[in-house]
Amino acid sequence: MKKLWKTIAAVLLACIMLVAGGLILAQNGLENPVSKVADQATANAANAALDAIGIKERADELLRENAGRISSATGIPEAAVQNMIDELDVQSWQVAPLPEGAVAQETANIAYDGIDATITAYDDPSIITVETNMGTVTLAVPESAQAILASATRLS
């Protein structure tokens, strides 16, 4: 089960952070929102850039393309893996400012393809922060993904 969470998180991190992490966004004239998600205007610009380059769609595709491998590695039936991918609903994730007063509850350290990342879950389950050597981004995640992400941080 732990491998499933790490695999899901690693694929998401590799897609979102590697491509979007400052490189593509900087090309769009943004002031590095990956490391400075300080206000809603910056978050909106970052979301527009992520949508424009299709990174969330690609992350979803990669998860789906690897569902069989995730199933084999974890022993979870492929249909259940597909259901979890549906629940993650990566395409609805949004860059968001960290709410004032948010209290970190759990962290997960994940390494994938040369990227080390820390995922932080908060007392507000709708928010996570992903930190890599390329920067930090806070994401608002849909309710359907919250239980899966909470399990991932507890199992790391």
Image (cartoon, rainbow, N blue to C red):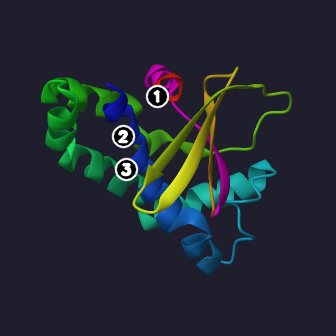
Does 82 lie within the magenta span? no
Q: Earlier in the sequence, mark 2 or mark 1?
A: 2
Q: Earlier in the sequence, mark 1 or mark 3?
A: 3
Residue 64 is left or right of residue 46, and the answer is left
Which residue is the site of mark 3?
11
- Indicate the amino acid at tag 1: Ala
43 in relation to 23, above or below: above
User: Secondary structure under badge 1?
Assistant: helix
Residue 16 is left or right of residue 113, and the answer is right
Residue in the foreground of this view, choosing between 114 and 139: 114
The location of residue 71, given as percent across then percent down, is: 17, 33
Tell me, yes or no, whether the two marked residues, 2 and 1, touch with CB atoms within 8 Å: yes
- Indicate the amino acid at tag 2: Ile
Please report the bounds of the magenta region as a residue range: 134-151
Which residue is the site of mark 1?
152
The location of residue 87, given as percent across then percent down, is: 36, 27
- Indicate the amino acid at tag 3: Val
C-alpha distance separating marks 1 and 3 = 13 Å
C-alpha distance separating marks 2 and 1 = 9 Å
Badge 1 local density, few (<14 within 10 Å), some, or many (20+)?
A: many
User: Secondary structure under badge 2?
Assistant: helix
User: Secondary structure under badge 3?
Assistant: helix
